[in-house]
Image (spheres, helix red, strand yellow):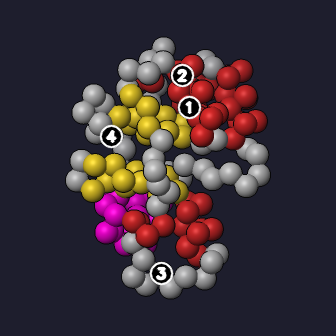
Amino acid sequence: MKVRECMSRDVEIANPDQSIREAAMIMARIDAGAIPVADGDRLVGMLTDRDIAVRAVAEGNDLSNATAGDYMTKPVTTVPDTCNLDDVAKVMEQAQIRRVVVVDGKGCVAGIVAQADIALAGRDGKTAEIVKQVSEPGRSSQ
């Protein structure tokens, strides 16, 4: 099965100059733990709830002028929309991430695929292995 068959297509994207509060509000509205950050058509990072909670808030930073670009995770791990799920799972395992941005042939964001998407596609055994590999302490999440 190709990743484009099970990815989430309705992806909200933050701008790197957008306030971290506005980006967090988008995440809350769409009930997502991460959103891609793009400057025009160029993907420049991924902002996660963990980036906000751990790298911004917990470190005691002054967030009054903080932007998505200040705390986003970069570089972004991506897979092409033509990739099969087994290869996506390998990418997620190697990068130890829970979700990955899917790009089209032009490199533009086409969707996001998460562990749950792979599980729903009937890859439960593979998802268990991904969860095991990803859940090692001290690793970042995207």
Which image quarter: residue 128? Answer: top right
Residue furthest toward the top? 1
Q: Nearest to the eye among marks 4 and 2: give it.
A: 2
Lower position in the chain sequence, tag 4 or tag 2: 2
Lower position in the chain sequence, tag 3 or tag 4: 3
Q: Which residues are magenta?
A: 14-30
SS at circle 4: strand
Q: How far from the left and from the top, in percent, is residue 124?
A: 68, 22
Is 72 rendered above or below residue 55? above
Query: With 138 as the anchor, is 106 left or right in this view?
Result: left
Lower position in the chain sequence, tag 1 or tag 3: 3
Q: How far from the left and from the top, in percent, is residue 57?
A: 58, 76
Viewer-proximal residue, 23 or 142? 142
Magenta-colored stretch includes residue 79:
no
Viewer-proximal residue, 3 or 41? 41
The residue carrying mark 3 is 63
Q: Nearest to the eye among marks 1 and 4: give it.
A: 1
Lower position in the chain sequence, tag 1 or tag 4: 1
Q: Residue at x 24, y 47 (%)?
A: 41
Compute the Cα span from label 3 to label 2: 38 Å
- Hey, what amino acid is under mark 3? Leu
Disc 3 and disc 2 in contact, CB within 8 angstroms: no
Q: Nearest to the eye among marks 1 and 3: give it.
A: 1
Q: Is residue 81 visible?
A: yes
The residue carrying mark 2 is 87
The residue carrying mark 1 is 91
Q: How far from the left and from the top, in percent, is residue 127?
A: 67, 28
SS at circle 3: loop
Disc 1 and disc 3 in contact, CB within 8 angstroms: no
For mark 3, does the 10 Å Cα neighbourhood hold few (<14), some (14 to 19), or many (20 or more) residues? some
Lower position in the chain sequence, tag 3 or tag 2: 3
